Amino acid sequence: METDYPRGLTFEDVWAALMENREQQEKTEKEIEKVSKIVGKLGNSIGELVEILIAAKLWEKFSAYNYNFKRAYRRVQVFDDNTHRQLTEIDIMLSDTEWIMAVEVKNDLKKGDVEDHIIRMDKIHRFPPAEARGKKLLGAVAGGIIAPEACDLAYQSGFFVLELRGESVGLIPPPEGFSPKVWS
């Protein structure tokens, strides 16, 4: 027994329309997933570009503060040697014979990023990578865009602050009385 629905639609017609709609929805979801992956890769590429631009000749920015950094390392992993578990990663690590500086780089530096770097600095201090052992540890944050509250917290926490300015990087002058925190 076949029943007609309003406007002359049969159950089979309605069912076919629902199935077609379901197939279209699945196709749309797959397309959204593809676009999301592309956007994610683009975001990672932009982040890596900012990191590369900031890393270029970064060590020169600290000579006015009597730091003589000669080496720069990117993406230094910090491990707990007892558990062999990675604890964190240093975006850029500057080094000389006495000092290490761990620099956290963000496209858009926010207060939460500075808070995360404070925690990261404690891990680096407790589990220093080989190049950092026996050296005094300093911290810095850098970004393409820096929120004012992030800059304020960074200075309160004893971090240097660097900003991407076109094709170069500038050290934002610290406030009067600023003293970098030394983790030693």
Image: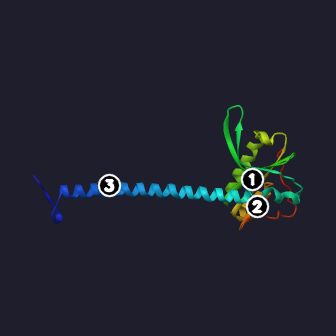
- Whole-angstrom CA distance, mark 1 to mark 3, is 49 Å
Circle 3 residue = 23
Q: Which mark is residue 103?
A: 1
State the residue in front, 6 or 67. Answer: 67
* Pointer 1 or 2: first along the chain: 1
Residue for point 71% across, 53% down: 115
Q: In the rendering, at what x and y percent does residue 125 appear?
A: 78, 42
Q: Which one is earlier in the sequence, the residue at label 2 or at label 3?
A: 3
**Image spot of residue 148 (x, y percent):** 72, 65
- Say whether marks 1 and 2 touch (CB < 8 Å): yes
Residue 121 visible at all: yes
Q: Indicate the amino acid at tag 2.
A: Leu
Give yes or no for contact between labels 1 and 3 (Cβ–Cβ under 8 Å). Answer: no
> Is residue 132 shown above or below 57?
above
Task: Of the two numbered discs 1 and 3 on the same chain, state the one appearing first in sequence.
Answer: 3
The residues tagged by marks 2 and 3 sit, at their Cα atoms, a distance apart of: 50 Å
Amino acid at circle 1:
Val
Rendered image quadrant of residue 184: top right
Give how far across and how far down residue 86 sits, in percent.
67, 39
Q: At label 3, which amino acid type do we have?
A: Glu
